Amino acid sequence: MKYKDYYRILGVARSATVEDIKKAYRKLAHKYHPDVSKDPEGEEKFKEVAEAYETLKNPEKRAAYDQLGSYQPGQDFQPPPDWGKQFGDSHFSFEDVDLADLFAGLAAGRHRAGPGTGQIRMPGQDYEVTADISLEEAYRGTEVELNLTVPEYDAKGLLHRVPRIFKVRIPKGATDGQRLRLAGRGGKGLNGGRDGDLYLTVALRPHPLFRVSGHDLYLDLPLAPWEAVLGATVEVPTLGGPVRLKVPPNTRAGQQLRLSRRGLPKPNGKEGDLFAIAQVVIPAATSERERELFRQLAEGSTFNPRGRFQQEVKSER
Amino acid sequence: MNAEHTEAVWLTEDHELSLAELAELSGLSEAELRELVDYGAVAPIDPDSSPWVFSGKCLLTIRTACRLRISFDLEPHGVALILSLLDRIQELEAQLAALRAQLPHPTRYS
């Protein structure tokens, strides 16, 4: 079994009072709690902190923990020979047991002590995972394989962390941050309690062309100056394959052209829209003939793009 | 562990849950849930209808509430306050993401 220094994790002395421990825990929980923290490693850190607090706040568990002795964090160790006897179970194998599970197991073991004494129905644990998928996968629906380490009881009623592979079908309808509930795919319930659920959060990987907002998609649509002025029919990529889009004459840069129902499918069977944002771009290199045509345009046009500048300056006077 | 036998449900407005289902899935009691409704942290789809029906999104809010209550040892009122602030943060983040999506990105066309 690997040793964890719960005192060091909370940053308190081994002689700390319950009050000190509570204070240290609260401070760290503020910092790392996944519901309030933006720290990407917050969740892992919070788990450690919560585990340390769970043991040290309870005088019995703390005493049992102190009896284990003191080692370096991560060091392999065996509890003293009689350790655990006082908790009514003497035949533990400590080989691949996690320290946290050992203490949880002790508490649970006592609740379940002896046959015939009222067995409490315990619902299985809920698991929470995040699945990174591409926009294309969200569009079509996909199957993902998730590697999770989950606590499971062995035949002796002791908890172990076991690696498990979950195959989860993500139906179409996904967008960034959306949650899926898979009933009964969490931990097994005890004594007839219901099985836990698996909660999956979808995270969409950034796409080189499309930007996502809810189930709507945004795409930059580059247009040549003459296409913007004269109008054009252009081919536009969508997740369902290319479509032809009619750009009306006199399309301004920044104008959004809506391609109805070409966004991501929604769970209710409807679809989001795709918005093409017009951008007027100029060629990086021009030929002599092109420059000549632009010169003719410049001479023949009365267009003053900065007319408003003069107007506004006049009105200031 | 068979994927085929599991019903996957999107937790959106379209997925409706009763008070009893919410209690079972969140680990809070019905009384605690009623208290969260009283404080305005969670709202049934139609507060005047009986029995109450909740949107699937509520389940996520309530599970957050449950975690916060346990982790920070909070009163229901404190939980309700945090939930309303988290809600606002989420709303603002969604708006920010929507605006970012609409912002044209610098082009490198040639």
Image (spheres, coloured by chain):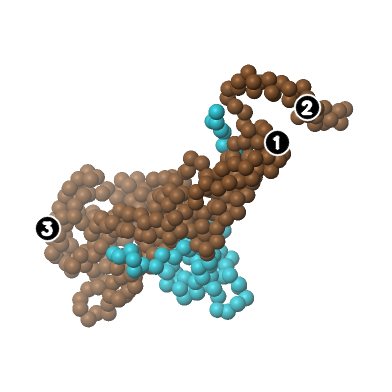
Chain colours: A brown, B cyan
Q: Chain of mark 1?
A: A
Which chain is disc 2 placed on? A
In primary-sequence order, the first of circles 2 and 3 is 3
Task: Label 3: state its secondary structure.
Answer: loop
Residue B15 location in percent, x, y?
Answer: 50, 68
Residue A295 % position (x, y): 71, 21
Residue beneath the point at 86% across and 28% down: A314
Asked where in the image residue A162 lies, by quadrant, the reply is bottom left
Looking at the rendered structure, whether the residues under marks 2 and 3 are on a common chain is answered as: yes
Q: From the viewer's perspective, is residue B27 above or below residue A255?
A: below
Q: From the viewer's perspective, tell me whether residue A151 is left or right of residue A236.
A: left
In the image, what residue occupies the spot 39% across and 56% down?
A142
Please identify the quarter of the rendering in which residue A169 is found: bottom left
| Disc assigned to residue A301 | 2
Q: Which is nearer the eye, B67 or A164?
A: A164
**Residue A12 x %, y %:** 34, 47
Q: Residue furthest bottom?
A: A116
Question: Element type at marker 1?
Answer: helix
Amino acid tagged 2: Ser
- Does residue A240 lie above or below B26 as drawn? above
What residue is disc 3 on? A81
